[in-house]
Amino acid sequence: MSISPPADRARPARRSLLRSRTAGGPVRVTNIELFFDLVFVYAVTQLSHTLLHGLNAVGALQVLLLFLAVWWVWVFTSWVTNWLDPERPLVRLLLLALMLAGLLLSMALPEAFGERGLLFAGAYVFMQVGRTLFVLWALGDDAPANTRNFQRIAVWLAVSGALWLLGGWLDGKERALLWVAALALEYTGPALAFAVPGLGRSSTADWDIDGGHLAERCSLFVIIALGESVLVTGSSFADATWQPQAVLAFVSAFVGSVAMWWIYFDLGAERGSHAIRHSADPGRKARAAYTYLHLLIVAGIIVGAVADELTLRDARQRVDAISGAVLLGGPMLYLAGNAWFKKTVNDTHLPLSHLVGLGLLAALAAVLIRQPLSVFALGLATSSVLLLVAAWETVSLRHLRRRLHESSSA
C-alpha cells in the first residue's frame, strides 16, 4: 500500500537558474563565460586563415556566411547568460557542452563547404536549438513573458536548423543556398520580433536584460578579434625576412591594431555601456547596437588581420583588386561599424572623425584605380587613416571624457 507524503513534506521547488539582480547592482561577466569565449579565439583564427587561403570572390562569400553563423551563435549565447546564472552547476554544464560543440564547429570551418559540412551544421544546430530548449526549461514560471519569447525563438531556430542540416547533407550550390536561407531566417527573426502564428510577436520591453553585461560581453569579443589580429602580425613578422621595409610594415600593422583598439575602447565602449544601462528600453538598444552593428566592427578586425598578413608576407607586391579590397575593406567596415554603433547608443549624429576617415579610405580606392601601389604603401596609408581618426576623436571628446571620469569617481 502506498502512502502519499503530506503536503508540507512535498519535494521543494527547484531552485531558480536565473541570475538574481539587486536593484542597481551590476551583472558581472563570470569566469565560465570567459572560458567559453576561448573557443571563439580559435574560431576567429580559423576564419581569418580560411579567408587568406581562399582569397577570391567565392571564398570571401563563404567566409562571410561562416562568420555570420559564428557571430550569431556567440551573441545568442551571450543574451542567454544575461538571464541565466553561470555560477549554477547546471548552467555551467550547459556552457561546457556548448563549448565542446563550438570547438567542433570551429574545427569544421575551413572545410565547411567541403567534407565537413554536416559536422559544421550539426554543431551549429545543437548549439542554437539545444541552448534554447535548456533556457525554456530553466525559465519555467519565473519569467512568463520571456518563456513565451523563447517559445517563439525555438520555432524559428527549429525551422532554420532543418535548413542547416539539409544543407550539410547536400553539397555544392544546394548547400550554399540552403545555408543562406537558414541564415537569412535567423537574422530577420529579431527584427521581426520572432513573430509566430498563434504565439504572437515579442516585445523588446520583455527582453529584460542587463545592458552593462551585454555591452561588456561584446567588448570582450572585440578584444578576441583584436588579439587574433596582433597574433597574426607577430607570427607573420617572425617568419618574414627582417628587411627595413618588412620592419616598417610590422610597425604599421601594429599601429593599425592599436588605433582600432583606441577608436573602440578609449571612450566608445564606456559610453555605450553607460547608455544602455540607463536606457528605458535596453532590449531594443541591445538588438540594434550590439547584436547587429557589432558585426561590422568584428568583421573589420578579421579582414584587417588578413590585410596585415598580406602586407607582411611580401610588402613589395603590387595591389590587385582582391588585395586592395582586403586592405581597404577592413578599415572601412571597422569605421562604419563604430560610427553607427556610437550614433545608435548615444542617440547622436555620426562622428565626423569616422566620416572623414571613411572619405579618406574612399579617396585611396580612387587613387588605386589610377596608380597601383604596393601593399606596403597602402597598408601604411590605411594605418595612418585609423591613427588620424583615433587622435581626432581623442582630442574632440576630451571634455566629455573628463566629465565621465569625474562622475564615475564621485
Image (spheres, helix red, strand yellow):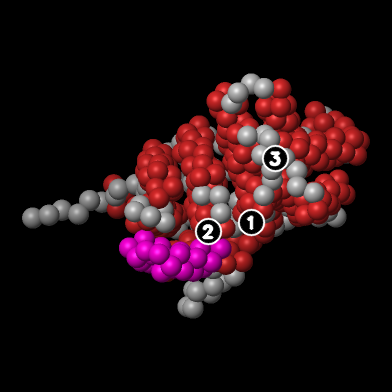
Residue ID for mark 2: 58
* Residue furthest to the left: 1
Assign a secondary structure to mark 3. helix
Q: Position of residue 357 (x, y in %)?
A: 82, 46
Residue range corresponding to the magenta coloring: 160-187
Label 3 vs label 2: CA separation? 22 Å
Residue ID for mark 1: 292
Assign a secondary structure to mark 2. helix
Specify the label residue 375 is tagged with.
3
- Judge whether 255 appears above or below 145 on screen: above
- Which numbered disc, 1 or 3, marks the residue closer to the eye? 3
* Residue furthest to the bottom: 197
Three-letter residue code for mark 3: Val
Viewer-proximal residue among 359 and 321: 321
- Which numbered disc, 3 or 2, marks the residue closer to the eye? 3
- Residues tagged 3 and 2 counted as in contact (Cβ below 8 A): no
Q: Quadrant of residue 254?
A: top right
Viewer-proximal residue among 373 and 230: 373
Mark 3 or 2 closer to N-term?
A: 2
Q: Position of residue 122 (x, y in %)?
A: 35, 55
- Which numbered disc, 1 or 2, marks the residue closer to the eye? 2
